Image (spheres, rainbow, N blue to C red):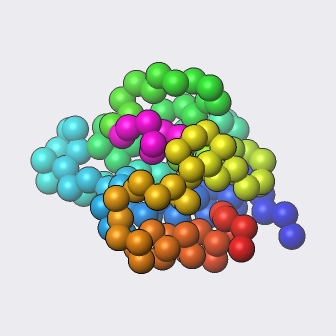
Amino acid sequence: MNKTKEERLETINKLIKFISKSGRRFFYTKSTLRSDDEESVAYMELKKGRIYFVDNYTKDAIAVINNHRRWNNFSHGGTLQALVMDFADFIRTGKSTNGKHGYGGLFCPHWGHADEIQQEIIDYAKEIGYLKS
């Protein structure tokens, strides 16, 4: 059964939340740009059919546009930007795009997690349908 764009968005948000609780806790912050005591987790959202990444630190919604390299108020580096673009492609198309935008996606060996934590993230991504088994 093909999932809708909204269902794929929900899948990605589950994965982002899982990543935010694992290892180095990417996509999570203890304080935001506007508050020193506000915990925050990034997420993806749809607005009028467009895909946005809501940054956990700046709290800004950033349009995820293919090949658009300058993202104002994106508080992460190029590796996570590439992963977010992979996520957006999955939401748009429903097709596996892991690593399409560089850095090897979730299979990249340079995330800095212990191997078992990275494998847990990969296994969860497969379980929820983001990565192919």
Question: Residue 64 in the image: x percent, y percent?
Answer: 57, 34
Whether residue 71 is visible to the viewer of this picture, yes or no, is: yes
Instruction: Report which quarter residue 92 is drawn in.
Output: top right
Question: Residue 50 in the image: x percent, y percent?
Answer: 65, 36
- The quadrant in which the N terminus is found is bottom right
The residue shown at (64%, 72%) is 126
Disc count in the image? Answer: 0
Left or right, 25 with respect to 131, comes to left
- The quadrant in which the C terminus is found is bottom right
* Magenta stretch holds residue 77: yes
Q: Which residues are magenta?
A: 76-82
* Magenta stretch holds residue 112: no
Whether residue 25 is visible to the viewer of this picture, yes or no, is: no
Question: Residue 62 in the image: x percent, y percent?
Answer: 48, 33
Left or right, 57 with respect to 85, comes to left
Pick the front one: 67 or 51: 67
Pick the front one: 118 or 4: 118
The residue shown at (45%, 42%) is 79
- Vertical placement of 76 versus 94: above or below? above
Instruction: Report which quarter residue 127 is drawn in.
Output: bottom right
- Vertical placement of 63 versus 24: above or below? above
Left or right, 126 with respect to 107, comes to right
- Judged by its main secondary structure, the magenta piece is helix
Left or right, 17 with respect to 28, comes to right
Q: Residue furthest front?
A: 109
The residue shown at (73%, 55%) is 96
- Vertical placement of 127 versus 83: above or below? below
Pick the front one: 70 or 104: 104
The residue shown at (47%, 22%) is 70
Q: Residue furthest left?
A: 36
